Structures are given as structure tokens and as C-alpha cells.
Image (spheres, rainbow, N blue to C red):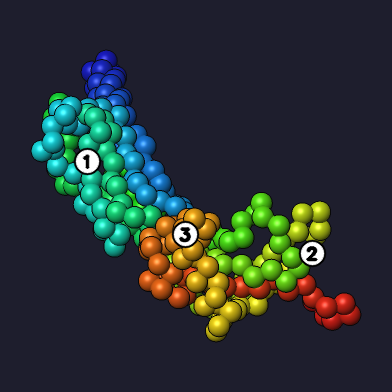
């Protein structure tokens, strides 16, 4: 009986030791972003233990990367690695980062914990609009909307609306095209105009270079009295 109890005790002690070892294994301590995120320019990762010699420019990337957006990774210090995108991530993007097989900490210990991480940028959203929120507008205002990806025009008309401070009413929009839109785009080229920021957010220096479905003109229209909503 004593031998049996001693054997059970040794087994339990060994199991506890293995659990403690797994818990203390170096791992990815933080990965950002995850889930759905907008305005992504950088992926940042922190490990729980030193992974590389500080200042070593030859240290390889720790991940296999599946991402359509071009970028480059580098170590900030022994525990922190970042992946810088060449430009802000567009909508509809999904990126996956998987730790390379056999990767370990600087002291030789293999990595434990989660090994695969991912994020996406969701559907198209408004990056910036002109006029801005703080500008004075009229009831039939025409807005220029810079989107972070190409969108179906019918979807823009169905899902974009305006709101007026103090009112609960949602004001729908109608898309504007033709000569009126071209005149609005021409105004973006005026030196010193606020349109420069809008173009920079699209990554272009001229409205003519912007993807038409990513630079939308929409007019706010309040429903007529007596009409159905």
C-alpha cells in the first residue's frame, strides 16, 4: 500500500511539474490588432521572453505571414516585433500570422501558447468627409466621402445617412455624378484647400488617380413633408 501511494504521489508530482513547465513556457504575450480593425498601419507583437539579441539586424521574422498588403517586419528590441504596412490597410483585407515551426526563445526554450493570429479590416468605411463635421452645412449639402476601399454605389446609398445634432431624424443621401461631381473633384486640386487631406488618406495626389468607387459624392436630402419615410 505504501508503494502504491508513493507511486501515485510521484505521478501527481510529475503532472504538476509538466503543467508548471507549460505555463512558464515563453509565448506570444500580446498581438495587435485582432478581430476586425480599421486604419491599420502596423501589427505589433510582444513576447513573454527575449527572442533575439537586442540590436541584431539579421534576426529573422518569427512568423509565416499571409497578407495581401505589402509590408516589412523588424525587431524593436529583444521581445517586441512589428510588421509595418506600406500604407493603411484597405477594406476587405484579411491577414494571418503563424509562428514559424521550431521557433524558440533566445535561451533555447520552445514557444508555447497560441501560434496563429489573424485580423481583418471589414467592409468599406468612410475615412474622411468634406465638409468636415465641424463645418457649416445646408439641408441639401453635397459631401465628398473618401472610403477605405471600393464600394458598390447601391450599398452606399442604402447605408450612408446624415444626422443633425439635436434631432433624431436620419437624413438619407442620393449619389451625385456627372458634371457636379467633376466640379467637386476639381476643387480638391486647389492649392491650400482642405481636399489635400482627403486625397492623402486615399494615397493619391490627384483626384483623377483615385478609384471612382472609393471617392463618392453624396447629397443629403431631407424627406419631403407628407411623404413616406
Tell which circle, 3 or 1, labels the residue nearer the N-terminal end.
1
Label 2 to label 1, Cα distance in Å?
A: 49 Å
Image quadrant in which you'd find residue 82:
top left
Q: Do the numbered discs 2 and 3 sit on residues whose CB atoms are within 8 Å? A: no
Residue 159 x %, y %: 62, 70
Residue 220 x %, y %: 69, 71
**According to the image, label 2 marks what residue?**
169
Image quadrant in which you'd find residue 137:
bottom right
| Residue 191, label in figure | 3
Q: What element carries label 3?
A: loop
**Drawn side of residue 45 relative to residue 226, left or right:** left
Q: Do the numbered discs 2 and 1 sit on residues whose CB atoms are within 8 Å? A: no
Q: Is mark 1 on a helix, strand or loop?
A: strand
**According to the image, label 1 marks what residue?**
74
Q: Is mark 2 on a helix, strand or loop?
A: loop
**Drawn side of residue 185 relative to residue 141, left or right:** left
- Residue 77: tell me if it is visible: yes
Q: Do the numbered discs 3 and 1 sit on residues whose CB atoms are within 8 Å? A: no
Could you say which is closer to the camera, residue 12 or residue 72? 72
**Drawn side of residue 155 relative to residue 20, left or right:** right
| Residue 22, label in figure | none
Amino acid at each position: 500500500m505504501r508503494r502504491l501511494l508513493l507511486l501515485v504521489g510521484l505521478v501527481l508530482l510529475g503532472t504538476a511539474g509538466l503543467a508548471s513547465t507549460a505555463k512558464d513556457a515563453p509565448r506570444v504575450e500580446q498581438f495587435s490588432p485582432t478581430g476586425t480593425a480599421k486604419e491599420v498601419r502596423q501589427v505589433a507583437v510582444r513576447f513573454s521572453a527575449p527572442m533575439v539579441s537586442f540590436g541584431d539586424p539579421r534576426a529573422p521574422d518569427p512568423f509565416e505571414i499571409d497578407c495581401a498588403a505589402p509590408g516589412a517586419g523588424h525587431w524593436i528590441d529583444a521581445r517586441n516585433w512589428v510588421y509595418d504596412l506600406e500604407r493603411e490597410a484597405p477594406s476587405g483585407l484579411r491577414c494571418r500570422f503563424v509562428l514559424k515551426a521550431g521557433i524558440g526563445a533566445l535561451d533555447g526554450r520552445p514557444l508555447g501558447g497560441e501560434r496563429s493570429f489573424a485580423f481583418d479590416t471589414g467592409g468599406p468605411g468612410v475615412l474622411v468627409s468634406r465638409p468636415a463635421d465641424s463645418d457649416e452645412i445646408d439641408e441639401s449639402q453635397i459631401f465628398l466621402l473618401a472610403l477605405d476601399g471600393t464600394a458598390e454605389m447601391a450599398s452606399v446609398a442604402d447605408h450612408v445617412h446624415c444626422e443633425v445634432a439635436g434631432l433624431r431624424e436620419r437624413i438619407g443621401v442620393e449619389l451625385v455624378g456627372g458634371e457636379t461631381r467633376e466640379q467637386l473633384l476639381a476643387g480638391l486640386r486647389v492649392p491650400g484647400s482642405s481636399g489635400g487631406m482627403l486625397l492623402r488618406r486615399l494615397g493619391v495626389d490627384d483626384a483623377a488617380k483615385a478609384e471612382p468607387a472609393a471617392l463618392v459624392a453624396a447629397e443629403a436630402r431631407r424627406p419631403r413633408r407628407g411623404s413616406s419615410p
